[in-house]
Amino acid sequence: MSCTTVRFHRDLYQRAAIEEAAALFAEFARFGVGRDGEHFVVTVNGIDAEVEGDVVAEFCNFALANSANALRGLD
Amino acid sequence: MDQLQIESIDPVASTVTFSLDHELYPRDALYAAAYVFLDRAYVLLDRAGDRYLVHLRAKQALPEAELRAFGGELANELLAQTLRHRVVKANQSLIEQITALAITGAVGARSRAGEIAGDTSSDVGSSEETAAAEFLDDPLGLGTPWQDKKDPV
């Protein structure tokens, strides 16, 4: 089974924002969030093969949008 | 070094990576500029030393020229958002004063309405009752049925 790893720089992404995005996409894949130096490391497993589009890339967009909104105080 | 430069470009995968000096633009501006691309591209931000990296992958296949054009658009957006950020920061106290005045004015208007209705008590329940009573007032007779107006008994 394929496993993808995404690294989010801690200066630019908030853990809560990443976890919120992971929760949103939980029905399409399994997400694990860890830390490695200056980055949060997200492992994505078991991506639903029937889902159209790129789950990991969409997840990244949501993580960015959540981080931006959190910084602006929109959440 | 250029303000914004292309680090890599791959037309086959429709990906392009830009880098920019992290001191040149505030982080807010970077977020806002990246946000603009979310409907057309997958965006991943990163940082390498003193430079921010912006990875973009177009959602639809694009020729190299359009991928390069993302750079110009990103630079424009960064500039616009930085200016907006500065204007807001420079006028922060003025914005807060105007907002406070607007809120105070709204509260004052409601208090005056209560006084006009003959209710000068300040508890919340009374002011809500006053508001409900005002709602039932019909000084212009708009609630009177047309037939009653035409044929008064």
Image (cartoon, coloured by chain):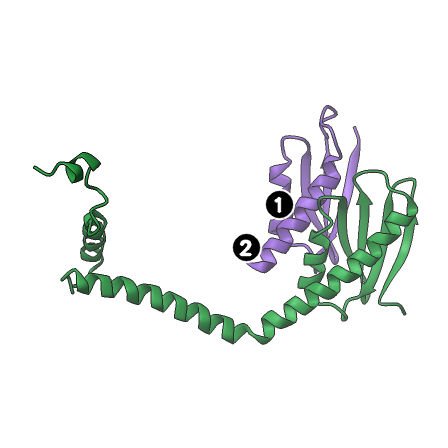
Chain colours: A purple, B green
Q: Amino acid at mark 1?
A: Glu
User: Which residue is found at the position 71% from the left and 47% from the top?
Assistant: B38
User: Mark 1, residues whose alpha carbon is within 10 Å: few (<14), some, or many (≥20)?
Assistant: some
- Residue farthest toward the left in the current orientation of the protein: B153
Q: Quadrant of residue A62?
A: top right
Q: Quadrant of residue B130?
A: bottom left
Q: CA distance from mark 2 to mark 1?
A: 17 Å
Q: Is residue B137 left or right of residue B42?
A: left
Q: Chain of mark 1?
A: A
A57 over B21 or under it: above or below: above
Q: Quadrant of the C terminus of chain B?
A: top left
Which of these two is toward me, B28 or A40? B28
- Same chain, labels 2 and 1: yes
User: Which residue is found at the position 91% from the left and 52% from the top?
Assistant: B8
- Give the label on residue A74, or none: 2
B30 over B146 or under it: above or below: below
Q: Position of residue B21 (x, y in %)?
A: 81, 67
Which of these two is toward me, A34 or B143? B143
Q: Amino acid at mark 2?
A: Leu
Q: Tag 1 or tag 2, which sits nearer the N-term?
A: 1
- Residue farthest toward the top in the current orientation of the protein: A50
Q: Position of residue B14 (x, y in %)?
A: 87, 42
- Name the residue beneath numbered marker 1: A19
Q: Is residue B122 visible?
A: no
Q: Quadrant of the N terminus of chain B?
A: bottom right
Q: Is residue A20 visible?
A: yes
Q: Secondary structure at mark 2?
A: loop
Which of these two is toward me, A19 or B16? B16
CB atoms of marks 2 and 1 within 8 Å: no
